[in-house]
Image (spheres, grey):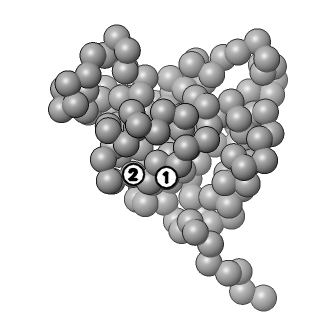
Amino acid sequence: MARSRSRLSAGTLVLDCEGLVKWCAADQRVTALVREAQDNDFRVVVSALTPIEAQDVRTTADRLRWHLSRLRIEPVSEEISMAAVELLRAQGLHGHKYAIDAVVAATALSSAKPVVILTSDEDDMTKLCGKAVRVVPV
């Protein structure tokens, strides 16, 4: 039996902090989106900064590690760092407040297309990524 084509096709699903936290908390919607992405050969990724931002006493270290083992943690390379700086400059934003969002956006923009990002910062991510990334609020 052939698998029906879903809303997602091969590309990348990026989880920001809230996406990762909700996935760790077994949020039904986020879990379904991650499962759909994996079923459709999407790479599921986070920036190396995201687990740091997601650290919360409500999520056990073992649970966070287990979930992280099921996705790819993208490093913050010099290229990603400089791309994040350029995104901030282009939008007139200060790194003190938007640094992690800019790194996540730069990670998304450098990922295999199409790219979907699960985020609680819909406005910021839309501003930083433009139309190159589909922003899904969680």
Q: Residue at x 74, y 27 (%)?
A: 64
Residue annotated with mark 2: 133
Q: Can residue 93 be seen in this view?
A: yes
Which element type, helix, strand or loop, lies under badge 1? strand
The image shows residue 46 at horizontal and vertical percentages of 54, 36
Answer whether labels 2 and 1 touch (C-beta < 8 Å).
Answer: yes
Q: Residue at x 81, y 23 (%)?
A: 62
**Picture layout, residue 1 above or below residue 118:** below
- In the rendered image, which quarter is residue 107 located in? top left
Q: Which residue is drawn at 39% across and 33% down?
A: 124
- Foreground of the two, 3 or 135: 135
Q: How crowded is mark 2: few (under 14 residues within 10 Å), some or many (20 or more)?
A: many
Location of the C terminus (image quadrant): top right
Q: Residue at x 62, y 72 (%)?
A: 6
- In the rendered image, which quarter is residue 57 located in? top right
The image shows residue 65 at horizontal and vertical percentages of 74, 27
